[in-house]
Image (spheres, rainbow, N blue to C red):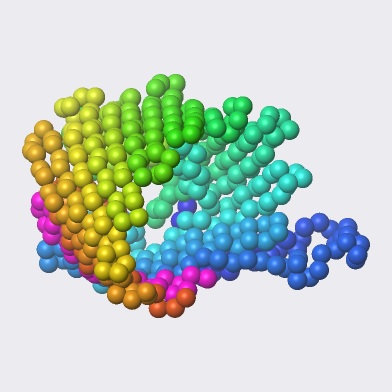
Amino acid sequence: MMHRWPAWLACVAALVVTDAGYADDGPADESPPAETRPADNQQLAWEVEGFLTGELRLRTADGDADLDLISQLAAVVTGKRLRARINARLNADLAGDQQSNELLFDTWDTFSGDVQVRTYEAYVAATKLFDGVGELIVGRQFVDEGTYFHFDGARLNLELDEVLKHLQASLFGGWSVRFRDDPEEDNWLIGLVLRGAAGTTKTRWRLEYFHVSEFFAGINQTVIDPVQQPVVLPAQHFDDDLVALSIWHKAEQIRVFGRFSLLNGEPNELQLRGRWFTKDGKWTVLVEWYQLFERLFDVTNDLTPFAPSLGSYEPYGRLTGRVTYRTEDWIAQAGLVYRALLDDGVEGQFNHEYVNFYLTATRLDLEDGKLDLSFTVNGYGTSGNRTTAVGGSADYRVLTTLTLSTGVDYSLWKYDWFLDTEHEDVWSVWVRAKWKARKKVTVEGGVSVDDDRFATYATVFVKVIWRF
């Protein structure tokens, strides 16, 4: 569902709902006696914090140009028994109405109208329910319990120590958020999450169950699919059940994590991670294994961003290792990432096989504490080529309120959040400035250039952030 509320109106609405909910807490004739009733200044003691941003962003690519005005509002209002949150964004296309065949055509250009408003969060939470053990959150919200969901609905959090020590439960349900001009109906989800500790809090666990139902309208144009190219995705209905178990354990110098999930009764994901660190905190070693067991193609978008609308996501394994050394003056890091597809014949967008190694060294507080310098070596090995690149960055604190930054780096594949696409063989160069103009006002600006295999993209931006 798409809301076209102005960001300031959504914020005012959240405040009104929150204030009204507190004032109507119980019939008027059941108010406590005067000697026990809270004072007015206590009853109306609200805390408000958040930020408001405004940004002008100009992008160019091989002769095309696009100028946007972007504003974001995020605020949390907290009272004794209620909490409200609003998170909204405005995007105005000031110049450069892009067409689908142009390089700068992005997700905002897919909607009708030059001005778009998106409300990402708008909820009210009633706290301290059921003698202080419950919390009810109603409205548009995010949930991240091993799987990430964005929905309109309700979430009930419960502390169940009386049932089992350290036991917590979350039950939620609602309608999946879809930002489209003509949103599909019948997209809903429910979830139940149990969290607890085995014996002591050194070992924690989380049991997850999610059911997601989605009607997919289909795509008449061809999409990238490494198994069946080209392919047209028909309209269909998806119903998926995901069950997962996560376990954390901490010892004196070791942290261990594991998660295993089933999708519709079949193995879906396995994640194993171990981290060791020295007592003085100078050395840290991390090793992680992630595996996707089955091809994701005809599943809901809530469970993977790559299917079905962007094609398929192929089963793969990824091994990550990283060693970090840190002192007051130095941070050094060496890492290795190995990603292998179960079937090496299905490489495509978002589905790659590679070996990536990197070395970084950062020297802090040079020039009387004003300068930080970083040096990076980044290498890739793929079935098509081997590439090694050298980069670096510098941060210089000209004043206590002004920092200048510049740098260059390389990525074999780089995801572009603005264009919702993946660039290949990318060199990036940037220059940025950050100025703390007032105690609660920060101004940022910069220029960046991304040069990939096919085109050169340049971005210039100026951004003002007001924190309150």
Considering the whole magenta stretch, tell me its main secondary structure: strand
Is residue 441 or residue 123 the one in the foreground? 441
Position in image of residue 291 (x %, y %): 33, 28
Left or right side of 258 for 305: left
**Residue lying at 18% horizontally and 61% vertically, measured from the top left:** 429
In terms of image quadrants, where is residue 273? top left
Left or right side of 194 for 217: left
Position in image of residue 323 (x %, y %): 29, 39
Residue 467 magenta-drawn?
A: yes
Is residue 429 or residue 209 the one in the foreground? 429
In terms of image quadrants, where is residue 227? top left
Is residue 298 or residue 191 the one in the foreground? 191
* Residue lying farthest to the bottom in this orientation: 437
**Residue lying at 33% horizontally and 33% vertically, measured from the top left:** 287
Asked whether residue 237 is in view, the answer is no
**Residue lying at 47% horizontally and 74% vertically, measured from the top left:** 440
Numbered disc total: 0
Position in image of residue 199 (x %, y %): 61, 27
Q: Answer above or below: position of 111 versus 204.
A: below
Residue 302 magenta-drawn?
A: no
Left or right side of 408 for 384: left
Is residue 181 or residue 451 the one in the foreground? 451
In the image, the segment drawn in magenta is 440-468
Position in image of residue 174 (x %, y %): 55, 43
Asked whether residue 404 is in view, the answer is yes
**Residue lying at 15% horizontally and 40% vertically, measured from the top left:** 380
